[in-house]
Amino acid sequence: MEVTEAIRNRKSTRAFLPKPVDREIITSILECARWAPSGVNSQPWQVAVVTG
């Protein structure tokens, strides 16, 4: 999916399933985010994963 297509087709989710997200999926998403570029390689982000 192209970025412009993703932007045009975005939706706001207001209702979620009660099923928790698997830890493997959370880990995979965080691993992808870890490789995202940042300005001047400053890497200013902090991540908190809250479950339960």
Image (cartoon, grey):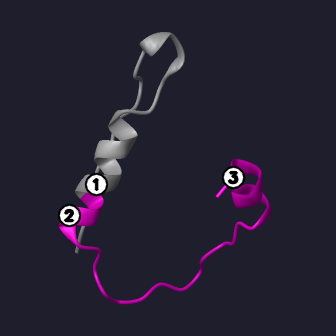
Q: Is residue 27 above or below residue 10?
A: above
Taking the image as shown, residue 26 lies to the left or right of residue 6, namely left
Whether residue 49 is visible here, answered yes or no, is: no
Whether residue 6 is visible here, answered yes or no, is: yes
The residue carrying pointer 1 sits among few (fewer than 14), some (14 to 19) or many (20 or more) residues within 10 Å by Cα, namely: few
Amino acid at dot 1: Ser
Q: Is residue 28 above or below residue 19?
A: above
Give the labeled residue for mark 1. Answer: 28
Q: Residue at x 74, y 56 (%)?
A: 7
User: Mark 2 and mark 1 in contact (Cβ < 8 Å)?
Assistant: yes
Q: Residue at x 22, y 75 (%)?
A: 52
Amino acid at dot 3: Glu
Determine which quarter of the picture holds residue 42: top left
Q: Residue at x 80, y 61 (%)?
A: 8
14 is within the stretch colored magenta: yes
Q: Secondary structure at mark 2?
A: helix
Q: What secondary structure is the stretch in magenta mostly built from?
A: loop
| Structural distance between the alpha carbons of marks 2 and 3 | 26 Å
Amino acid at dot 2: Glu
Q: Residue furthest top?
A: 40
Give the labeled residue for mark 2. Answer: 24
Q: Is residue 28 above or below residue 31?
A: below
- Percent coordinates x, y for residue 46 in the rendering: 34, 35
Image: magenta residue range: 1-26
Give the labeled residue for mark 3. Answer: 2
